Amino acid sequence: MYSSSDLREAIEKNQLRVLYQPQMTSDGSRMASVESLVRWEHPVHGLLGPGHFVPLAEKTSLISELGEAVLRQSCIDALRWPQISVGVNVSPLQFRDPAFAEKIEAIVRQSGLPFERLELEIVESSYFDDPDKAEAMLRRLRDLGIRIALDDFGTGYSSLSCLLRLPLDKIKIDRSFVVGVDTIRSASIIHAIIALARAIGLKVTAEGIETEDQQRFLRAAGAHYLQGYLYSAPVPVEMIDHLLKQSDPIRYVA
Ligand code: C2E
Ligand code: MG
Ligand code: MG
């Protein structure tokens, strides 16, 4: 498939694109933030999703470059939308870079985006290599005002120790639980996750909302924010401009 030199070239030639997916308030009426999701505009194969190249980047130091390029672009784009914040995914491998926190701080400062409008989406495995180091880096970023969300919650192995140790503001319930809200098992797990998050003062986003039934369930269960194709697929920056201008609740699927 693709080699790391292809990917390096793609970063250098500016072939990475960032799309944005709205996160809505739980009644579905207002966009509270967007999540930034990277794509590779491949000259031959078209728009490639992260599954095609993020794992490759993670095998090399390219993941730091990729992460920094996406963060830089996301901060610049977010300056267009003073009323909302932006969530940026961080690979667990980026935590191996000792200068990770300093680099993030420098990029955000240089962009002019207020730290409070950035949310970093981390995953549980960020914590595996060196929990003390991960905790210290996140504390430093959070002390600046950057918010921290724990993505894909419940799909890793150390969820509860992450909740105990890491400085967090939000958890994102993985789509794999949302898909099964009509089963007692998934519904019970969702209720338990939301109760736990709320008890320790965290906000909750439910990912992968595709149907009205899922929206109703997650809203009643107490999720603060909802994200999914029901509202919008990930879209280019101009489409977020457009969606923020219209007053009707969003119903746009690319
Ligand atoms: P994620 O951070 O959990 O992002 C959510 C994924 O679910 C996105 O896939 C989004 O397009 C998809 N999604 C959103 N709503 C729905 C829905 O209603 N139904 C379904 N079936 N899917 C939905 P995408 O863009 O392919 O990204 C996949 C993963 O790649 C992300 O999962 C994240 O882990 C990673 N990723 C994306 N961008 C970046 C990045 O800039 N850096 C890093 N390190 N990872 C990234
Ligand atoms: Mg994410
Ligand atoms: Mg996720």
Image (spheres, rainbow, N blue to C red):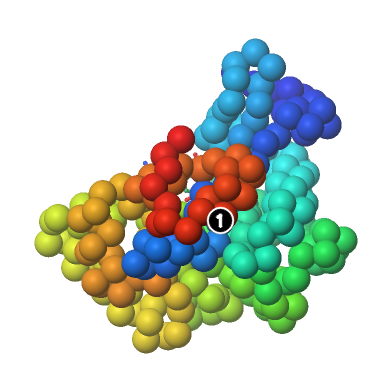
Side (left or right) of 86 relative to 24: right
Q: Position of residue 238 (x, y in %)?
A: 63, 43
Q: Is residue 199 left or right of residue 128?
A: left
Q: In the image, residue 168 lies at what x, y percent?
A: 54, 75
* Residue that carries the numbered disc 1 in the rendered image: 244
Q: For disc 1, does the CB lie below 8 Å from ligand 1? A: no
Which amino acid, mark 1?
A: Leu
User: Which residue does the image show at 60% across and 65% down from the upper left?
Assistant: 84
Query: On the picture, is 121 further left or further right than 117?
Result: left
Residue at 62% across / 50% down in the picture? 241
In the rendered image, the vertical position of residue 75 relative to residue 148, given as above or below: above
Q: What residue do we see at 66% from left, 26% from top?
A: 41
Locate the N terminus and report the quarter of the image it occupies. top right
Q: Nearer the viewer, residue 93 or 51?
A: 51
Tell me where residue 74 appears, x and y as whole percent.
70, 52
The residue shown at (35%, 48%) is 230
